[in-house]
Image (tube, rainbow, N blue to C red):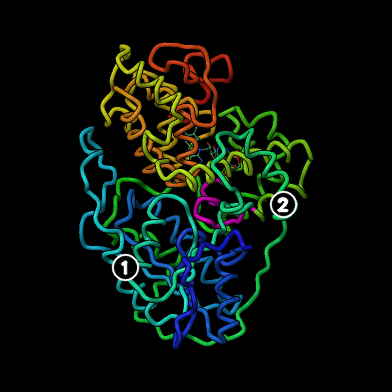
Amino acid sequence: MDYRVHAPAESRPRPGGEFVLYWMQTTQRAHDNFALNFAIEQADTLGLPLQVYHGLRHDYPWASDRIHTWILEGVIDLYAGFAARGINYAFWLDEGTESYTQWPAGGRDAAAAPVHRSPLTVHRSLLAQLADRAALVVTDFFPTFIVPRQVRSLRGDVATPVIAVDSATLVPMAYHKKEHGNARGIRPVLMEALPHYLWPADNPSPRVQRPVELPFDPVRPTAESIPSLVARCDIDHAVAPSPMFRGGTAAGRARLHDFLTTGLRHYADLRNDPNEPDAVSRLSPYLHFGNLSIHEILLAARAAGPGEQYARFLDEALTWREVSHNFCYFNPKHRTPEGMPAWAREQLREHETDPRPVLYSDEDLEFARTGDELWNAAQRSYLRDGWMHNYMRMLWGKAVLQWTPNAAECLRVLEHLNNKYSLDGRDPNSYGGIMWTFGKFDRPFYRRPIYGTVRYQSLKAAREKFDVPRYIAAMS
Ligand SMILES: Cc1cc2nc3c(=O)[nH]c(=O)nc-3n(C[C@H](O)[C@H](O)[C@H](O)COP(=O)(O)OP(=O)(O)OC[C@H]3O[C@@H](n4cnc5c(N)ncnc54)[C@H](O)[C@@H]3O)c2cc1C
């Protein structure tokens, strides 16, 4: 059984189809891509060419210059990577004409308001036109954000079967039979499966290589044209591209190389020091957009060693990353308070009436205007760089609970700030990380106000753990 393939019961190729379509969504790479490989296999069996379609909409939640720029930078590499393999790849940029979607919107009352438009209104036509002509549509399997809804929507719209393939995790999400409540539970399962899955992926070329007629002129961004392409899109222009990162596979490989040559050897000792960002990989945005595979990263890290550093890195990149995917895959409520463990939800409800030291407005939180300089510095790293160190994310998330009236409000704020600003946001790890703030994957600790027995981490006590003034200065 191929655990990577998620196919509806009736998935036979449509007779008379002109090609196999790979609708690229979240695995934005031309290599180590199981969905692509599955599409090639199907195209070869049917004696048909393969067409890759990659569209970028203007109206997905939190669409901004930062996210668009990253994706367009990656598209430059995708054209080169697909051309090298003799694969037809076409990118379409939907500039949009209406105002961008704010979802969930900023205000406190807005969580309940249905403000987002249908996710397929604009792109359906091009995608559906291609899908209508295809024998089979293959796409990426992803357990959160708009992806499950988009796949469902296309399945409802076209007669051609739509098969989703999981390239996101090392051990396929469907390999697990259940939701694991914590890292301790999933770790032995992953470690047992590791030797079966940690292998270099095949990168075949399709047998039939002929062009497919397209219903649009593909967009070909260059480094020079990206700013003007982004400026034309109807998206949030207030969130600027990150000065810290460049998107795409080539930049991801450069980052991986730097980490393996300088950072990995310090990983176990320095990974909890926010003043040592080079001791961690900063690969999370490349993993989120699928620019690099987890296979490539782990194989390279294992070869680079040393063994005990690799083991620590493996625990984050495999255990913690995949327990988050497992959570989103098995728990459809992962974006809501029901995604919190029952004991923690109960504790937080019991302590809802505890007095808060202060309640900040959404704007004060978003623009780093709280009374705590360390928290503000952490938030500034999201605002400016689009990335935050893991240790700071933990402090950042925990602190907001005492500044918001209840857990549901806190969740709404954290999701919005994390997904709007962090390049690696809108990911299963986003929900794993945010829900950890509310006791997910954790056990009860000693009781205290507001948090009950949910673990608390103090911003004040951080001064004993690392050089707080240095971190604040770096984020000024
Ligand atoms: C409140 C909160 C919000 C978070 N939001 C996100 C998010 O939106 N996107 C995101 O990718 N991660 C998120 N995390 C998890 C973690 O902080 C980041 O994955 C990590 O900081 C990324 O930096 P890195 O690539 O240098 O990690 P490294 O330490 O180099 O680890 C390598 C990879 O392992 C994975 N990983 C590491 N730590 C974790 C973790 N605690 N949980 C899950 N996977 C992990 C990531 O894919 C990471 O790229 C969040 C954590 C918290 C507490």
- The response on whether ligand 1 sits within 8 Å of label 1 is no
In the picture, measured across the screen, residue 187 lies left or right of residue 27, that is right
Q: Amino acid at mark 1?
A: His
The residues bearing labels 2 and 1 have C-alpha atoms spaced at a distance of: 37 Å
Q: Earlier in the sequence, mark 2 or mark 1?
A: 1
Q: Which residues are magenta?
A: 284-294
Q: Which residue is mark 2?
A: 300
Q: Position of residue 421 (x, y in %)?
A: 39, 42
**Numbered circle sitting on residue 123:** 1
Check if residue 377 falls in the magenta segment.
Answer: no
Q: Nearer the viewer, residue 242 or 365?
A: 365
- Mark 1, secondary structure of its residue: loop
Q: If the picture is divided into quarters, which one holds ligand 1?
A: top right
- The response on whether ligand 1 sits within 8 Å of label 2 is no
Q: State yes or no: discs 2 and 1 in contact (Cβ < 8 Å).
A: no
Determine the residue positioned at 49% across, 86% down. 211
**Numbered circle sitting on residue 33:** none
Q: Nearer the viewer, residue 424 or 19?
A: 19
Q: Amino acid at mark 2?
A: Ala
